[in-house]
Image (cartoon, rainbow, N blue to C red):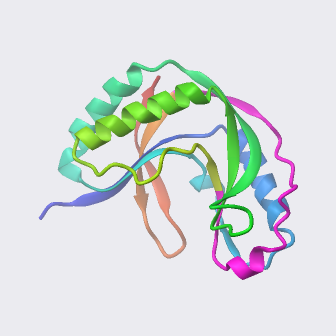
Amino acid sequence: MNETIRLFIAIDLPEKVKDVLMETAVALSENVPNRAVRWVTREQMHLTLRFLGDTAVSQLPDLQRELAELVARHQPFQLQLGGVGAFPNQKRPRVVWAGLAGDLTLLRKMQADIEEWVVASGWSPEKWSYNPHLTLGRVKDPQQVRGLNWDTKLEEVGFGVTAVQLMQSELRPSGPVYTVQQTVLL
């Protein structure tokens, strides 16, 4: 039997960024019913670069080696938080997010390189073009989120990106649990 684990590639966030994201989620949630949005927990906060999904454990060594080689070709860069929004839009929110500013060109270049490598390694191409964001919550009941305060101010704290992580995601009734499988320095 071929054992699989759910994997994704992401950038971890500094604690000060998680503090601001948590404060923003609380401010956003103040005018909506409790269960209308499933807010992301502090432990789940990260910047996704590519979701891989179910992956054979036997692929892990090659995946880790190739990811290390790819990421090592990129230089560290700076990002900062910038604004709050929703997919597909604020009138019909499904995902509530915090935006990013800063060296987005370098972020997009690294993500495009990862995407190219992942597709060449046998994964299907992403359906959507990459739109860097930090998920704050997933809307469970669109009718009840009309009170969401889109004017909530997000502190535009900056942070350096110096590493990429290969993460394992275990789905549990209480929500996903993430475990770092690899950290690669830029």
Closer to the camera, 122 or 4?
122
Side (left or right) of 66 relative to 86:
left
Position of 178 relative to 175 (above/below): above
Residue at 63% over, 49% down: 134
Residue at 80% over, 54% down: 24
Position of 143 relative to 103 (above/below): below
Q: Quadrant of residue 36?
A: bottom right
Q: Quadrant of residue 92?
A: bottom right
Q: Which residues are magenta?
A: 136-162
Instruction: Determine if residue 35 is in view.
Output: no
Q: Quadrant of residue 152?
A: bottom right
- Whether 153 is among the magenta residues is yes
Estimate the x, y position of residue 147 in percent, counting from the top left. Answer: 84, 72
Residue at 69% over, 45% down: 99
Closer to the camera, 5 or 112?
112
Estimate the x, y position of residue 54 in percent, counting from the top left. Answer: 30, 59
Side (left or right) of 169 relative to 174:
left
Instruction: Determine if residue 53 is in view.
Output: yes
Total numbered badges shown on the rendered structure: 0
Estimate the x, y position of residue 127 in percent, counting from the top left. Answer: 41, 54
Estimate the x, y position of residue 64 in percent, counting from the top left. Answer: 30, 36
Closer to the camera, 83 or 4?
83
Residue at 68% over, 30% down: 159
- Whether 88 is among the magenta residues is no
Residue lying at the far left of the rendered structure: 1
Quadrant placement of the N terminus: bottom left
